[in-house]
Amino acid sequence: MSAFIATFRRDLALMWGAAGGAVAPLGFFLGATVLVPLAMGPERALLQSAGPPLVWIAAALAVLVTLERLFQADLEDGSLDQMLLSSAPLEVLVLAKGAALWIAIGLPLAIAGAPAAIALQAPPERALLVAASLALGMAAFIGVGLVGAAVTAGVKRGGVVIALIVLPFFAPPIIFGSALASGQDVGAALLILAGCALGACALGPIAAAAALRVQSE
Amino acid sequence: MLTALANPARFMSYSAWAAPLCLFAALGLFAIGLPWALFLSPADYQQGETVRIMYLHVPAAWWSLGIYVFMGAASVIGLVWRHALADVAARAAAPIGATYAGICLATGSLWGAPTWGTWWEWDGRLTSMLVLFIVYLGYIALWNAVEEEEKAARLAAILCLAGLINIPIVHFSVDWWSTLHQPASILRAEGPSIHPSMLGPLFIMAGAFFLLFAALTMMNMRAAIYRRRIEAARLRGANA
């Protein structure tokens, strides 16, 4: 447990300190959101139904761009070797890194989803639902993203490869998440989205740790 | 049997005749199946001649899934027993599986235009096949992106197994999603079962697609093993 907390605090400090925290992903999210009405036209009725799903897509892409450096820096500076030497299981440390990413970038993106949905003409009472569904969705995205980040950790400029690998895994959470954000079948969608998030956070670190052991050889 | 083929040298001598044999058997089945499917089999009473697309579409769909399962099995063998030949097999099969998935999507689209009245429908099956196609592309991209071949093999195997878990989940969630978003208005309910006169050519074509996959995979594997030998020889030459 202490190893989990130490890794969590280290990563949180690194993400907020050196990497500028959620500023860049939030900026990306904002930019992608602005493009939506520019592409679709400012018509209220059209945006109203398309808004929450498009917020979900923008947020998914925003978290995707943060994955590339997640393990790469640790591989380059030798931190990964230290993690392997530590007595704590690598899976737990990977989960700690994912949790730090969720706090540092996932939650800010989820919160930013609420004003973005309102700006895209979603009914204001739906904004809370958008943010809550995104908070769960971010956990699912990060859980599977860990795997994509781990298998490409040794690849220089692996951003496109990560996107290609991870996007098919985004399909289930985005289906249920944007149904939830649009207010369709709220109960069932919420349960399945939570299931996606739990499954991704349980299995993702195991696969990611297996890949990181390969990377460090 | 697997352990007997474990040795790359034995695989090379075995596949030297098995690969062309499979290829000729596949060509033979195509020579029987294609005329049967395209000219001799009956046209559908509802869809007319367009039903003949099925004889390409359905085998491609079956084997694009089958090949992924094959790659998953090869990945397990590669990861657990560190079997070099299994890694080579998984890598060799991937482009063929991707091509089959592509054939399935393209013929499905061509088939959809006259029968459903649309080139593309975001239906559960179409969408999950498209996702499978992207999974194949990601797998191939990972193999190409990682420079060290041994690392690439094991990372790709991990990814392949993760995809093996993901694909059924995608399939079920897409089913839920497509029934939520659209009732089956465009997809006409087909007959309860397929007429026996169509089963013959369908199974012949499925056999042909399988044998073609087996032949091409073995040929790809042989090429990969030759490439590895050339590299080894070059290294020896550089050291000498």
Image (cartoon, rainbow, N blue to C red):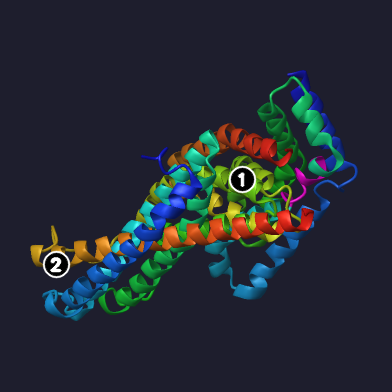
Predominant secondary structure, magenta span:
loop
Q: Are marks 1 and 2 on the same chain?
A: yes
Residue that appears at 74% across and 49% down: A154
List x then y, in percent, for residue A186: 47, 43
Q: Residue furthest right?
A: A18
In magenta, the rendered stretch is A66-74
Helix, strand or loop for disc 1 = helix
Quadrant of the image containing the N terminus of chain A: top right
Compared across the picture, whether B89 is left or right of B27 comes to right
Residue that appears at 13% across and 77% down: B43
Residue B213 versus residue B32 in the image, above or below: above
Residue to which mark 2 is pinned: B198
Q: Nearer the viewer, residue A138 or A129?
A: A138
Residue that appears at 79% across and 33% down: A81
Compared across the picture, whether B168 is left or right of A111 comes to left
Compared across the picture, whether B157 is left or right of B45 comes to right
List x then y, in percent, for residue A195: 50, 36
Q: Amino acid at mark 1?
A: Leu
Helix, strand or loop for disc 2 = helix
Chain where mark 1 sits: B
List x then y, in percent, for residue B130: 45, 62
Residue to which mark 1 is pinned: B155
Q: CA distance from mark 1 to mark 2?
A: 42 Å
Q: Nearer the viewer, residue A188 or A76?
A: A76
Residue that appears at 63% across and 43% down: A147
Residue B114 versus residue A176 in the image, above or below: below
